[in-house]
Image: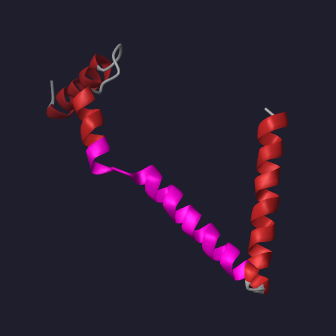
Amino acid sequence: MSDEEQVGVAMFSRLMSGIGHSGWSFNDAAGFCDRSAFVIPRGVLASTLLFVNLAWFGFQDQRWAKYVLFWLFVMACCHSFFARFVG
C-alpha cells in the first residue's frame, strides 16, 4: 500500500471512529466557555448602550436618531409579528 493510500485509510478510520458518540467532552466545553466568557452579556450591554444613546439623541431632536429609531421599531414589530404568527 502506498503512503497516500495509508493516509486515506487513516483519515477514513478516524472519521468512522467518531460515529456513534458526540466527539466532545465536558472538558472541551469548559475550555470553550473559559475562552469566550461573557460574550452574551457584552452583546446585551453593547446593544443597550447603543439604544440609550440613540434615544438620548432622539430626545434632543436629532433627525438622524429619530430616523434610525423609527426603522429599528419597524423591524422589531415585523420580527415580533412574524415570530408570533408565521412559522
Question: Could you tell me residue 84's position as x and y percent?
Answer: 80, 36
Front-most of 6 and 48?
A: 48
Question: Could you tell me residue 40's position as x and y percent?
Answer: 46, 50
Q: Residue at x 24, y 40 (%)?
A: 31
Is 4 magenta? The answer is: no
Quadrant for the C terminus in the image: top right
Which color mode does the image show? secondary structure
In the rendered view, does 24 fall on the left or right side of 59? left
Front-most of 30 and 23?
A: 30
Q: Please provide the residue range marked out in magenta.
A: 33-58
Question: Could you tell me residue 27's position as x and y percent?
Answer: 22, 31
Is 45 magenta? The answer is: yes
In the rendered view, does 70 fall on the left or right side of 21? right
Q: Quadrant of residue 33?
A: top left
Quadrant for the N terminus in the image: top left
Q: Residue at x 81, y 42 (%)?
A: 82
Front-most of 39 and 60?
A: 60
Question: Could you tell me residue 28's position as x and y percent?
Answer: 25, 34
Q: Quadrant of residue 26?
A: top left
Q: Residue at x 78, y 45 (%)?
A: 80
Look at the magenta stretch and give its main secondary structure.
helix
Placement of 17 over or under 34, stated as above or below: above
Q: How many marks?
A: 0
Placement of 78 over or under 31, stated as above or below: below
